[in-house]
Image (tube, rainbow, N blue to C red):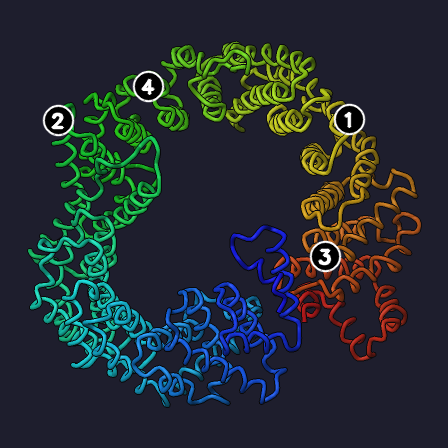
Amino acid sequence: MDEQALLGLNPNADADFRQRALAYFEQLKISQDAWQVCAEALAQSIYSDDHIKFFCFQVLEHQIKFKYSELTEVQQQLIRETLITWLQAQMLNPQPEKTFIRNKAAQVFALLFVTEYLTKWPKFFFDILSVVDLNPRGVDMYLRILMAVDAELVDRDVVHTSEASNYFALILEARRNTLLKDTMREQCIPSLVESWYQILQNYQYNNSELTCQCLEVVGAYVSWIDLSLIANERFINMLLGHMSVEVLREEACDCLFEIVNKGMDPIDKTKLVESLCQVLQSAGLFSIDQEDDVDFLARFSKLVNGMGQALIASWTKLIKNGDMKSAQDTLQAIEAKVALMLQLLIHEDDDISSNIIGFCYDYLHILKQLSALSDQQKANVEAIMLAVMKKLTYDEEYNFENEGEDEAMFVEYRKQLKLLLDRLAQVSPELLLASVRRVFNTTLQNWQTTRFMEVEVAIRLLYMLAEALPVSHGAHFSGDVTKATALQDMMRTLVTSGVSAYQHTSVTLEFFETVVRYEKFFAVESQHIPTVLMAFLDHRGLRHTSPKVRSRTAYLFSRFVKSLNKQMNPFIEDVLNRIQDLMELSPPENGYQALLSSDDQLFIYETAGVLIVNSEYSAERKQVLMRNLLTPLMEKFKVLLEKLMMAQDEDRQMALADCLNHAVGFASRTSKAFSNKQTVKQCGCSEVYLDCLQTFLPALSCPLQKEVLRSGVRTFLHRMIICLEEEVLPFIPSASEHMLKDCEAKDLQEFIPLINQITAKFKTQVSPFLQQMFMPLLHAIFEVLLLPAEENDQSAALEKQMLRRSYFAFLQTVTGSGMSEVIANQGAENVERVLFTVIQGAVDYPDPIAQKTCFIILSKLVELWGGKDGPVGFADFVYKHIVPACFLAPLKQTFDLADAQTVLALSECAVTLKTIHLKRGPECIQYLQQEYLPSLQVAPEIIQEFCQALQQPDAKVFKNYLKV
């Protein structure tokens, strides 16, 4: 072997050596006999370097996986012998191999097993067992090989075929795996099980590592072998013995879990679980409070969860089968586990608690189905409820300012508890409401002297009731009087207790989340609106010391104001005055750290817009308020644009451009307040927004930071097209002219939707403008598309693909809006060029989204121009180019009907052919029968069949025919 190249296998080697090693590996993979060199190196232990040994196994792995069938019988025998020789050497070596080498070797053994077991190596396991006997190193490899075999046959996380997308390859592999497992069950599983028992018996007291490995193997195989081989007295007794050995019990727990999880008859399953429980209980394992090993308890909790869910699955099957006596026995067995489940659910360690939630959830589902609950069951429901309330509480260690992995795990755990709470509400909504009310009132009476986590969870429970007790459109304060009264009382307490002043971010945020969740409360008791508004506006909300609270409050304040709508009328001007300083555009040079980020300010501007637009003021007053809101932005914009034009430093240019972009974004956001009921015109605000347009458009001619500035102004134009209607039209030509100067693929791609929006909205009103800018836009597009790009530059290729799609979408909008004259009036040469680009898009580019659009354009043009009175020469174009395109596109190798978009493209292709037939009649059929299809060497009977399908009145018939 190339010793120099092998140096690159060392993780500490430099990049050049590593690159050389990779190249060498690729070279060996395609070499005919390199695997033999590697096999010899392994069999004779030529190399001591671990990375070279691993490398040799990788070469063998590649040979077995992809080129095994090319080997002769003798060569295949050599691979078998190499692996057995290597295995024998393991028991004699002074030091065991590194774990990563043993694992790789096990994978290679497993690959050879799936390849040869059914044909050439039926004694695979017996040969290995005869080599390893009970030698600890041999046993270690044997167990690793068993796990690797299981991964190949069962583990669905492993993608076993390089053709994972190939459905048939997966089916064949599944069949092969089933046959392998069936053969193993017949020929060797009892012997393997016996070997596991011997290993466990031999090593349980003197080699915990091998014992745990063996327990893992038993747990893995039990899902697909005969359970009676494992679930018998000698095995179970041994496993239960392991449950009291500290170093073995976690693995023993997992093994018992797999046994319990095995699918079987419901009555047998109940008996198995019950017998296990009795032994575990008599061994003292149900005494949770005396156990302080949380890692073991987490596994034990998972086992109890498995036993509980297994019993519930049995109960469900028995009820379905109508076996009420056995179902009742199983329900009693379930009830007997509830006390243990509660102990685990309430445990202070969240992993232990989380592992039992499935059992708890399913138990509540059973109770929901019972016609009446016993006193004990009601007590169980209440106990679960109290446990959930307790476990929802944050602990002292939770880091609110810098949330890491532990905090994220607790958030996920809380989501699981929320599902339990929702299920509790389905079982006993009255009890849940009463329990939450009791906790809430007790806590808020003394919130000043209560720890933050208890105050937060009390408010959180109120918040969670909104989803747990569902109503339509948030109408929690009407309908059921008891519920409405309870929620109303709690909300009144929340807003009048002063708890919004609690000095902890979690409580503050929960307060605001809850008042927004129950915004309909303020329609019932509007006298509390000023109190809540002040909380939003002062140091508790938008001026809080925590940026996290300020940011979230900005969003919640926007939602609160929107939801209250007309009830905000008495407070509008006061609120606008109080938020004025929060809306200041903070230029980069003043060094002032604004309270809100620009993203947060967007919500404040939107809120201001909503307050003005939804007010009961006259149009004149609304205009004054909107002008007061937007004038400071316009003035700042002009000043900053001048500064940008003179700025030399690029960082400063970027900062100024961002600030200008924010100004445009804020103005855009205020316009979201308008609606069909409250238009810009009705509110008297057209003039203000037209002034904004005149202020912002000069930024398009700024040669610096074009991408940022154009993006902002383009977004503003999109909004104004919606809000100002035709009043925006005079600004479009000059804006378009600027945006088409010095533009790149991305600029054009983002500009075209603007033109599409104008075209679709104003149609013939913008026809003169479109005719004027049509060819300049196309020239700009073609220029960018024709730019040479590097062969491997994928981002440039993607940008071109997206631009091509945008171009075709533009043509589709023009033809679909009934303005084909825009294209027709461009002169014969230009029209022809455009048509050829569409044909090219339909046939040549392997992009089904673009192909679909092209066929939509072609069928529309045929519909408009394909009749007897169409443009001169178009009928000729239909037969020479459009008809061939409808055949050439689906015949391309890249036209993949397994792809949904391609199916849609084919559908539009069918529509195009149908439209040609509709417009040209028998002439079209004659052309296909006598000229075009014969030129493709299509058989006469197929031609006849095709033309018949095309003439069917139902378009679906032809579409389906074309698919086939």
Along the viewing direction, whichever of 915 and 894 lies nearer the viewer: 894
Numbered disc 4: secondary structure: helix
Q: Separation of disc 4 and disc 1 at Cα?
A: 47 Å
Q: Is residue 740 above or below residue 436?
A: above
Circle 3 sits on which residue?
846
Task: Tell me the number on the disc at residue 737.
Answer: 1
Mark 4 belongs to which amino acid?
Leu
In the displayed structure, 822 sits above or below 280; it is above
| x and y, in percent, of residue 318 in the image | 21, 74
The answer to whether 940 is drawn above or below residue 302 in the figure is: below
Cα distance in 3D space between marks 3 and 4 = 57 Å
- Residue at 79% across, 29% down: 769
Q: What x and y, as percent, mark residue 467? A: 29, 42
Provide the residue designation for mark 2.
445
Sort mark 4 into few (<14), some (14-19) or many (20+) by Cα contacts within 10 Å: some
Residue 252: image location, x then y, percent: 22, 68
Residue 921 left/right relative to 370: right
Lower position in the chain sequence, tag 4 or tag 1 = 4
What is the CA distance from the residue labelled 2 to the residue labelled 4?
23 Å
In the displayed structure image, the side of residue 518 where residue 34 appears, left or right: right
Q: Residue at x 30, y 17 (%)?
A: 530
Q: Earlier in the sequence, mark 3 or mark 4?
A: 4
Q: Is residue 530 above or below residue 9?
A: above
Q: Nearer the viewer, mark 4 or mark 1?
A: 1
Instruction: Answer whether residue 17 is visible to the viewer in this image.
Output: yes
292 relative to 649 in the view: left or right: left
According to the image, label 4 marks what residue?
533
Cβ atoms at labels 3 and 2 below 8 Å apart: no
**Residue 760 visible somewhere in the drawing:** no
Report the front residue among 523 and 823: 823
